[in-house]
C-alpha cells in the first residue's frame, strides 16, 4: 500500500468520529425540539422535565449542554443516564441508542402507560415500539413518528410535527 493510500485511509478514519459527533449533536437538538410539538398531561407539566438515556451515549453530553441553557416551558430540563429498567419511570422522554435497542421490548413494557415518549435509533423501530425513531435518509439524519404510540401515552401531538418527519403506522 502506497503512502497516498495510507493518507487517504487515515483521513477517512479521522473524519468518522466528527460525523458521529455531529449526528449526536443533531439527535440532541431534535430531541429538545420534539418537545415543542408534544404536550404531556397536566400532571406531568410540573417539576423537572426529564430526558433519560438508556446506557452510555455521547448524546448525554450534548443534551447536558442544552439543559444548561434551556428548559421545557416552565420546567427545568434534567438529563439522566439510565442503567436499570426501574429508573425509567419519572422520565418524559427515554432515548434508546442503537447499541441498546436489543432491550427495547423490555424498556417498552416498563414505560407503557407512564406518559413516556420512547425515542429509538434503528431501522423500523417506530413501527414496533418507539414513538419517534432516528433514521438516515440520503445520508442525512431524519426521524420517523408513530402517532399512535405517542398518543397511547396520553401525549398530544401537534400535527406540524408530521411535516418534519416520516409518519409510520404499526
Image (tube, grey):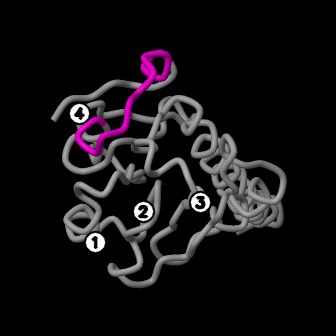
Q: Are marks 3 and 4 in contact (CB under 8 Å)?
A: no
Q: Nearer the viewer, residue 98 or 114?
A: 114
Instruction: Say which of marks 4 and 1 sits in front.
Output: 4
- Report the Cα–Cα distance between label 3 and label 4: 26 Å
Q: Is residue 2 magenta?
A: no
Whole-percent x, y for residue 34 in the image: 55, 37
Residue at the location (33% across, 65% down)? 101
Q: Position of residue 67 (x, y in %)?
A: 74, 57
CB of mark 2 within 8 Å of CB of mark 1?
yes
Q: Which residues are magenta?
A: 151-163
The residue where tag 1 is placed is 103
| Location of residue 68 with respect to 117 vertically, above or below | below
**Total count of labels:** 4
Q: Quadrant of the C terminus?
A: top left
Q: Vertical placement of 35 versus 12: above or below?
A: above
For label 1, the crowd category at 10 Å Cα-Cα, with few meaning under 14, some 14 to 19 and many 20 or more, is few
Residue drawn at x 76%, y 53% is 66
Quarter of the rendering occupied by the N terminus: bottom right
Q: Earlier in the sequence, mark 2 or mark 3?
A: 3
Q: Which mark is residue 47?
A: 3
Which residue is rendered at x = 55% and y = 61% of the image?
50
Amino acid at each position: 500500500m502506497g503512502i497516498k493510500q495510507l493518507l487517504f485511509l487515515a483521513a477517512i478514519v479521522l473524519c468518522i468520529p466528527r460525523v458521529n459527533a455531529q449526528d449526536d449533536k443533531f439527535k440532541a437538538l431534535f430531541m429538545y425540539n420534539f418537545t415543542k410539538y408534544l404536550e404531556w398531561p397536566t400532571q406531568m407539566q410540573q417539576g423537572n422535565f426529564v430526558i433519560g438515556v438508556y446506557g452510555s451515549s455521547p448524546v448525554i453530553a450534548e443534551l447536558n449542554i442544552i439543559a444548561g441553557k434551556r428548559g421545557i416551558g416552565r420546567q427545568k430540563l434534567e438529563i439522566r443516564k439510565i442503567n436499570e429498567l426501574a429508573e425509567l419511570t419519572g422520565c418524559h422522554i427515554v432515548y434508546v441508542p442503537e447499541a441498546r435497542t436489543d432491550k427495547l421490548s423490555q424498556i417498552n413494557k416498563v414505560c407503557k402507560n407512564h406518559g413516556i415518549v420512547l425515542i429509538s435509533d434503528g431501522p423500523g423501530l417506530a413501527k414496533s415500539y418507539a414513538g419517534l425513531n432516528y433514521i438516515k435518509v440520503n445520508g442525512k439524519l431524519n426521524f420517523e413518528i408513530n402517532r399512535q404510540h405517542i398518543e397511547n401515552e396520553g401525549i398530544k401531538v401537534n400535527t406540524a410535527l408530521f411535516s418534519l418527519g416520516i409518519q409510520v403506522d404499526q
